[in-house]
Image (tube, rainbow, N blue to C red):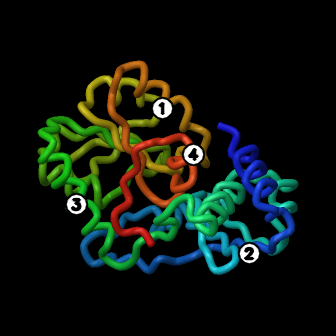
Amino acid sequence: MNVKKFLEDLVEKYNLLDEKVVIKVADPKLDTKRIKDYPLVTGKEVLLRAYLKGCKGEAFTDKPIEFEGTIREVLERNNIQELVAVLNAVMKYLNLTDKTEHCKGDEPERCAKELAKMLKEENIKRVGIIGFQPAFVKELVKTFGAENVIVSDLNPENVGKVKYGVKVIHGSNNEELIKKSDIVLATGSTIVNGTFEEIYNLAKKYNKRIIFYGTTIAGISKLLNLERFCVLGR
């Protein structure tokens, strides 16, 4: 997955190399009355947001960064989280993608209800979730039962723990998760942490439908024609 090449080609085509971009950590101010273990809230991940000509693009990462300069400099720095955030901002600016800004307040819970409703209407029986997203896990367990939800994550503080009735397995077991699931939901941050290609190829290998969720994958999902779920992003 050559995010840098995607971004380079776009900005050269539209003459944006020397446009100024600002990158900093953003806080979507999530409602924690009912769900307290969002990775953004526990401090395990941050939301990196790039600002370009009034448009925003994001990347989930565990590496907080602040930067101000040109897109040319971002390409030279070659940090994957910066490249992803800027790619999303560029594609938003060019009207090539949408929903590049994270939802707020209790919207992740509302999003989870929409997801559960959609999957139930499609007669899905067993769901695999790659990347612990607490609102999704909670709602899908409620809808399908804990025995029909499989969750993997890379955060050692989640792996082996029971979350909303489901024991979280390590991401190294994603092949088993994919094999056993009717449908796979995968966090868009797989683009940043380097696991995207393996997960995508495993889904193809086992002929499983895969839906990527969130703002991080806004641009790449359009470029690669991937199915994406992000109903309340901006």
User: What's the residue at 53%, 44% (across, down)?
Assistant: 190
10 Å neighbourhood of mark 3: few (<14), some, or many (≥20)?
Answer: some
Q: Earlier in the sequence, mark 4 or mark 2?
A: 2
The amino acid sitting under disc 4 is: Leu
Q: Quadrant of residue 12?
A: bottom right
The answer to whether residue 181 is visible is yes
Q: Nearer the viewer, mark 4 or mark 2?
A: 4
Residue 2, compared with residue 59, is above or below; it is above
Q: Which residue is mark 1?
A: 200
The residue to which callout 2 is attached is 22
Determine whether the residue tagged by mark 4 lies in a helix, strand or loop.
helix
Estimate how packed mark 4 is, as few (under 14), some (14 to 19) or many (20 or more) residues with alpha carbons within 10 Å.
Answer: few
* Pointer 2 or 1: first along the chain: 2
Residue bearing the label numbered 4: 223
Q: Give how far across and how far down residue 49 sits, in percent.
A: 62, 70
Residue 200 lies left or right of residue 136; in this view the side is: right
Q: Residue at x 29, y 61 (%)?
A: 135
Residue 146: percent from left, percent from top: 16, 44
Query: In the picture, which quadrant includes the N terminus?
Result: top right
User: Marks 3 and 4, how far apart in space?
Assistant: 25 Å
Please state if 115 lies on the left or on the right of 188 as rendered.
left
Give the Cα distance between marks 3 and 2: 33 Å
Residue 110 location (% of width, % of height): 25, 68
Give the amino acid at mark 2.
Val
Position of residue 88 in the picture relative to residue 199 (left or right):
right
